[in-house]
Image (cartoon, rainbow, N blue to C red):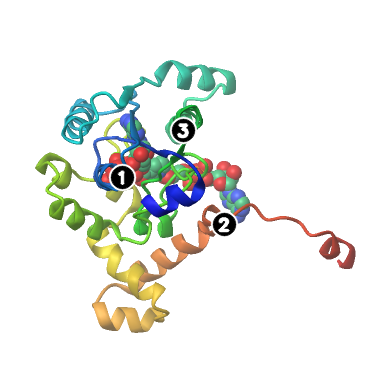
Amino acid sequence: MRDYIIKSGKKGGVVGVSGGIDSAVTATLLSKAVDNFYFLIMPSKSTPKEDLEDALALTDLLNGKDRRSVIWIDDVVERFSKLVDVNDKVIVGNVKARTRMILLYAFAQKLDYLVIGTGDKSELLLGYFTKYGDGGVDVLPIGDLFKTQVRRLGEYLNLPKNIVRKPSSPALWEGQSAEEELGVSYEAADPILYLIEKGKSDPEIVDILGVEPSLVSKIRAMIGKSEHKRKPPEIFRLEQLYSS
Ligand SMILES: Nc1ncnc2c1ncn2[C@@H]1O[C@H](COP(=O)(O)OP(=O)(O)OC[C@H]2O[C@@H]([n+]3cccc(C(=O)O)c3)[C@H](O)[C@@H]2O)[C@@H](O)[C@H]1O
Ligand SMILES: Nc1ncnc2c1ncn2[C@@H]1O[C@H](COP(=O)(O)OP(=O)(O)OP(=O)(O)O)[C@@H](O)[C@H]1O
Ligand SMILES: [Mg+2]
């Protein structure tokens, strides 16, 4: 992170801190890597009270009292929802994630910092993030670590037990649980993702892990369906248009 920030010509990094494990690990590593860091805590109505308390306690621990802002996002999100005339929880949830992204970029530019992303390998491969929301960042320092590894790294870094043990949730709506929405636990998904990345076939994975074939095909389908989220937008090449 330090090398990347120096090479980018920027002065530091800003990260959104939710009270969850991914941002806790990322914020901790950032605070160890560079002197110039800033934390944004951006609760909404759907943010559990403990998450806000845990985010405040963590940023205290990281000497972030004078380098953090707490910004409630509900008025902005409600304005967008009214303009679009929606109250679908997924659509409004994605507006929340994108509102946070806009705030992070505005702070980053004001401070001459980069936006440090918190996505982990499991979420990135499964497409479990909002395109241009929490997916809209400058770098992904823990993007090559599976969720189960991030949790272990959190333990190693001695992060508060509340955070290390907390079940993952985007908290985009009340009661949201990542594993319920995904329909699979990270403990079960991570070894499958690992073997898919290693190029193993479905029958090989079923054989190695002793899991249901339907679970492996479901996970492979999730990776395929979310490919567009991991790539820059496709440019339609003129030569292709003329030749077709
Ligand atoms: N083939 C394709 N090529 C190019 N673009 C394509 C596309 N298919 C869809 N799209 C675009 O992608 C959009 C759908 O993607 P997106 O807007 O992300 O929306 P979507 O994937 O429907 O929702 C985001 C999911 O991520 C979860 N999430 C969000 C935020 C944080 C976390 C977390 O873990 O903290 C999790 C959230 O709970 C929800 O399940 C479509 O509306 C369309 O604009
Ligand atoms: N209330 C919030 N305040 C600040 N940033 C937030 C908030 N909610 C989400 N974010 C940002 O969006 C990212 C994506 O949320 P996500 O829930 O995937 O991560 P997490 O809460 O750190 O860990 P977990 O996936 O285990 O819940 C967060 O890591 C954080 O950077
Ligand atoms: Mg979370």
Query: CA gap, disc 1 to disc 3?
Result: 14 Å
Secondary structure beneath label 2: loop
Residue 176 position within the rendered picture, expressed as x and y whole percent measured from the top left: 30, 38
Dot 3: within a 10 Å radius of its alpha carbon, few (fewer than 14), some, or many (20 or more) residues?
Answer: many
Query: CA gap, disc 2 to disc 1?
Result: 25 Å
Identify which residue, 155 or 80, lies in the foreground: 155
Dot 1: within a 10 Å radius of its alpha carbon, few (fewer than 14), some, or many (20 or more) residues?
Answer: many
Identify which residue, 151 or 156, lies in the foreground: 156
Q: Is residue 45 above or below residue 28?
A: above
**Numbered tag placed on residue 242 in the rendering:** none
Q: Amino acid at mark 2?
A: Lys
Residue contact at pointers 1 and 3, CB within 8 angstroms: no
Q: Within 8 Å: ligand 2 and the Cβ of disc 3? A: no
Residue 82 position within the rendered picture, expressed as x and y whole percent measured from the top left: 53, 17
Which residue does the numbered mark 3 point to in the structure image?
A: 108
Residue 12 position within the rendered picture, expressed as x and y whole percent measured from the top left: 40, 39
Give me the residue at 44% from left, 32% from top: 104
Q: Earlier in the sequence, mark 1 or mark 3?
A: 1
**Numbered tag placed on residue 231 in the rendering:** 2
| Front position among marks 2 and 1 | 1
Secondary structure beneath label 3: helix
Give me the residue at 53% from left, 21% from top: 80
Q: Amino acid at mark 3?
A: Ala
Dot 2: within a 10 Å radius of its alpha carbon, few (fewer than 14), some, or many (20 or more) residues?
Answer: few
Secondary structure beneath label 1: helix
Which residue does the numbered mark 1 point to in the structure image?
A: 30
